[in-house]
Image (cartoon, rainbow, N blue to C red):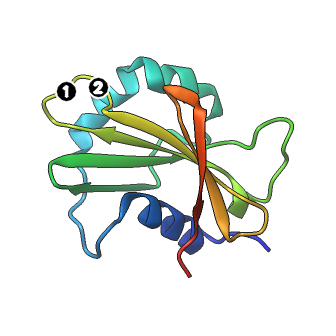
Amino acid sequence: MTVSSADRHAIIATQYALGEDLPCADLALLVPLKKSPEYRTIRPRVAKPRAIDAWQEEGLHFFVFELKAAESAPAQPSELPVVVFTMHPEETAPVSVAIVTPRPDGEEAEVVNLRDPGSAYIVLVAP
């Protein structure tokens, strides 16, 4: 089973408890985001420099970038991992950075905190 773009959005929505019709994130925050050590670390894996999703909620701004498949794990385009950056307007670096990788079954995704790679956990994809 492959994971569609809508399913990937559902994974992210499940992980971050997104509501409907949230306002777009402040795109000016992409400047400090892209200057951050976390972005520089993950940049070689970023598939495209433009965020594929962005929203704000409760003072936090979220930006999602599609990642290339890991060399050891070829994947269908719909199964590619994403990285989610959380920014706060008063901070110069991301508040958090998480890599979300759909599992091949399409029912679960692995979430890894980029700052603590040993903290991986699994979430169920919303139906």
Image quarter of residue 69 = top right
Element under disc 1: loop
Q: Which residue lies at the image location 38% right of the left edge and 21% below the top edge? A: 36
The 10 Å Cα crowd at callout 2, few under 14, some 14 to 19, many 20 or more, is some
Of tags 1 and 2, the one toward the viewer is: 1
Element under disc 2: helix
x, y (%) of residue 117? 59, 29
Foreground pick, 118 / 77: 118
Amino acid of disc 1: Glu
- Return the disc, 1 or 2, that comes first in the chain's sequence: 2
Q: Which residue lies at the image location 63% right of the left edge and 26% below the top edge? A: 44
Amino acid of disc 2: Pro
x, y (%) of residue 71? 83, 35
Task: Say whether marks 1 and 2 touch (CB < 8 Å).
Answer: yes
Reading the image, the residue beneath label 2 is: 32
- The numbered dot on residue 91 is 1
Mark-to-mark CA distance, 1 and 2? 9 Å
